[in-house]
Each structure stands twice: as structure tokens, then as C-alpha cells.
Image (spheres, helix red, strand yellow):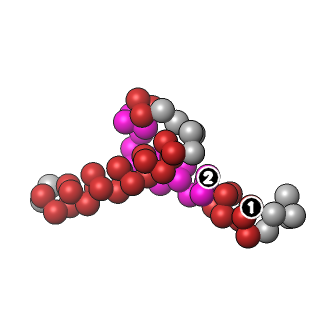
Amino acid sequence: MSNLLKSALEKERRHYSEKLYQIGVYNKEVMNKMTISELRKEYAYFFRSITNHKNYPYTR
């Protein structure tokens, strides 16, 4: 794997892990075992929920 691709994947993993950790969803041990695809799905699930709730607080 090229260094550029490896670096991009590490950066992406770090981004999703930091965001999920900040909202207290998972601890770091659990996230280290997750794949990038799993981190993406969890990020999309939680951050879409938060975004929608902020934009439309009375629809839930």
C-alpha cells in the first residue's frame, strides 16, 4: 500500500475515532478494533441524528 493511501486511511480513522470519542459513544479500545467502514457507519448514524435534531428540534 502506498504511503499516501496509508496516511489518508490513518487520518480518516483518527477523525472518526476522535469525533465518536468526544460524544462518548465508544471508548478507544473498542474503536481500535473497529474497521474504517464500521467507524464511518457509526459516525454517520450519530452525527446525522445530532444534526437533524439541531435543525429540527420539534420533529422527534
How far apart are the alpha carbons under marks 1 and 2? 11 Å
- Count of numbered circles in the view: 2
Comparing labels 1 and 2, the label whose residue is closer to the camera: 1
Confirm whether residue 7 shows in the render: yes
- Position of 22 compared to 54: left or right? left
**Residue at 21% over, 57% down:** 7
Q: Position of residue 6 (x, y in %)?
A: 20, 55
- 14 lies above or below 48: above
Q: Position of residue 20 (x, y in %)?
A: 51, 46
Q: Report the residue marked by disc 1.
A: 53
What element does badge 1 sit on?
helix
Q: Position of residue 41 (x, y in %)?
A: 53, 53
> Which of the labelled discs sits on residue 46, or is there none?
2
Q: Position of residue 9 (x, y in %)?
A: 28, 55
Judged from this view, the residue extending furthest toward the left is 2
Judged from this view, the residue extending furthest toward the bottom is 55
What element does badge 2 sit on?
helix
- 20 lies above or below 54: above
Where the N terminus falls, by quadrant? bottom left
Give the crowd class for mark 2: few <14, some 14-19, many >=20 residues within 10 Å.
Answer: some
Mark 1 / mark 2, whichever is N-terminal: 2
Query: Dominant secondary structure of the magenta stretch?
Result: helix
Q: Which residues are magenta?
A: 31-47
Where the C terminus falls, by quadrant? bottom right
Comparing 33 with 57, the one in front is: 57
**Residue at 42% over, 46% down:** 17
> Which of the labelled discs sits on residue 28, or is there none?
none
Q: Amino acid at mark 2?
A: Phe
